[in-house]
Amino acid sequence: MTGPLISIRNLTVSLPAGADRACAVENVSLDVGRNQIVCIVGESGSGKSITAHAIMGLLPRGVTVTSGSIHFGGVDLLKEPPDAMRKRRGRDIAMIFQDPMAALNPVMTIGAQVTEQIRAHRAISQGQALKQAGGLLDQMGLKDVAGLLKAYPHQLSGGQRQRAMIAMALSLSPQLLIADEPTTALDVTTQAQILGLIKRIQTEREMSVLLITHDFGVVADMADRVAVMHHGAIVESGTVKAVLGQPAHAYTSALIAAVPRGESLLAPLPDAPPVVQVTGLTKRFRRGGLFSRSSAITAVDNVSLTLSPGETLGIVGESGSGKSTLARCVIRLLDPDAGEVLLDGADIAHMKARTLRPLRRRIQMVFQDPFSSLNPRQTIGNILIAGPRAHGEDPGQARGRAADMLRLVGLSPEVMDRLPHEFSGGQRQRIGLARALMLKPDVLIADEPVSALDVTVQAQVLKLLDDVRKQMNLAMLFITHDMRVAAQVCHRVMVMRHGKVVEQGPTRDIFAAPSSDYTKALLAAIPGRQAR
């Protein structure tokens, strides 16, 4: 057959009354050719996912298609009866959802979920379907397939869950695969593996892929063609070479400029007495229960570091490398099993709680998920003044400083009477930073503060963190799995793997001449690095 596999023409999708705009998608036209990868790129709220859900016939309640057509193999999907669309989903068009943990059924094993889809479309036995499911998981490069088939989603890592979802999507050999942000918040190495897997399977099966992303590095590595969406409309489209090489729209240029380049921007600071000195820090966790033999896992293994005023030290590594556990030991949210954490010479690692309490205000943390770390029932004002009030500060004085802190992070003091759910992800991250700064800390720990943000919002938050560091002369421990981000904000980098430090030094030296094979692998996995 000739012509595109799927052809979207003048698609408009309306939002319910009271939404921030009338249409989620407005007058969108887009083609996906046969055996082709097309990327839709844009920020949150641009209409990318709504377009994908319109193709699948899975729009949320109250969100409706008001005009346009979506032709697939000559058939307008918008005019197909519900039963026909139900048969088409999975068989002809399949989708990999953004959050595999939310999309997978938590009370069903992986094997049951993969076989359920196969048996819904094919007249085969459970045993045959289970054998097919095992073969699919094996094709995804997963180990211990027999064990994974019996496992529940919460027992798998993020990368394993994503591979299991890809296996489900490919179980019926669809002609079109829609991948909605399939690597958001994954480690760069896991992201590279997932993207490589999608690319390999697309080539082997000669299928079409519609890939939704906010990262132009991913676009450079994956796409044949790209469409840029902004506020529900496509503002630019074309080949990857044309759009990335000579963007015609200012919004496209802004998105490309916001992508971290993976080039070190900060020179090491002159030597200064450290405000934090960590020596031989070790943390172990025990696992096992009443009916199983317990064993110890060393999450942080004999780690040492120093951090001076005004300096940003990046802690880089994959999930499970011990980064966040190290941070929680430094701030004393976890008690280490061995080692010292000296804050201006005082060992807070083994200090009694009563003695430690006055020192806690000197070391504060910005958490990875700004929504779950903010009390959903408290107003922003009450959230910001809670820390100072716990340390005996007058409520009126604390509220005045809260207004100053909100201005510092780029928000209006008028937001103090609003609740966390009324803000975007980037705004909530700014609120989390303001809360940490309310206590005038000497040390700020930022744990993956931009991992799930759009590239433009990410760039804004990174600039804000660096500006605040300069203004307040903060010592900052910056935890990330993205080497590009580390290059942008860190004076020095410490690379961790399996709880150990494999390499550390000035950021420029690490990027120019890494000595560890693991660091080289992290650098090689940066999306779009080969295209530059």
Image (tube, helix red, strand yellow):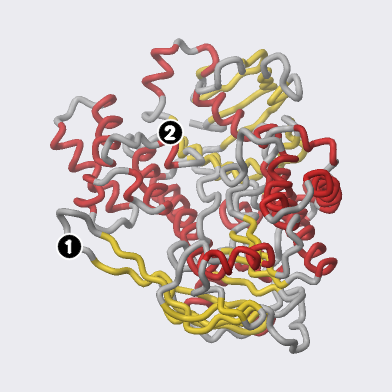
Q: Secondary structure at mark 2?
A: strand
Q: Looking at the image, is mark 2 or mark 1 earlier in the sequence?
A: 2
Q: What percent of the width, then of the height, locates residue 35?
A: 49, 43
Q: Nearer the viewer, residue 517 or 390?
A: 390
* In front of the other: 493 or 51: 493
Crowdedness near tag 1: few (<14), some (14–19) or many (≥20) residues, C-alpha within 10 Å: few
Which residue is located at x 49 percent, y 74 percent? 350
Q: Secondary structure at mark 1?
A: loop
Q: Label 1 amino acid?
A: Arg
Q: Position of residue 174 (x, y in %)?
A: 39, 35
Measured as percent of width and height from the top left, residue 205 is found at 39, 45
Total marks in image: 2
Residue 437 image position (x, y, % from top left)? 74, 58
Q: Quadrant of residue 363?
A: bottom right
Q: Is residue 131 left or right of residue 308?
A: left
Residue receiving disc 2: 94
Give the mark toward the camera: 2 or 1. 1
Of 155 and 166, nearer the camera is 155
Residue 293 — which label?
A: 1
Q: Residue at x 33, y 69 (%)?
A: 297
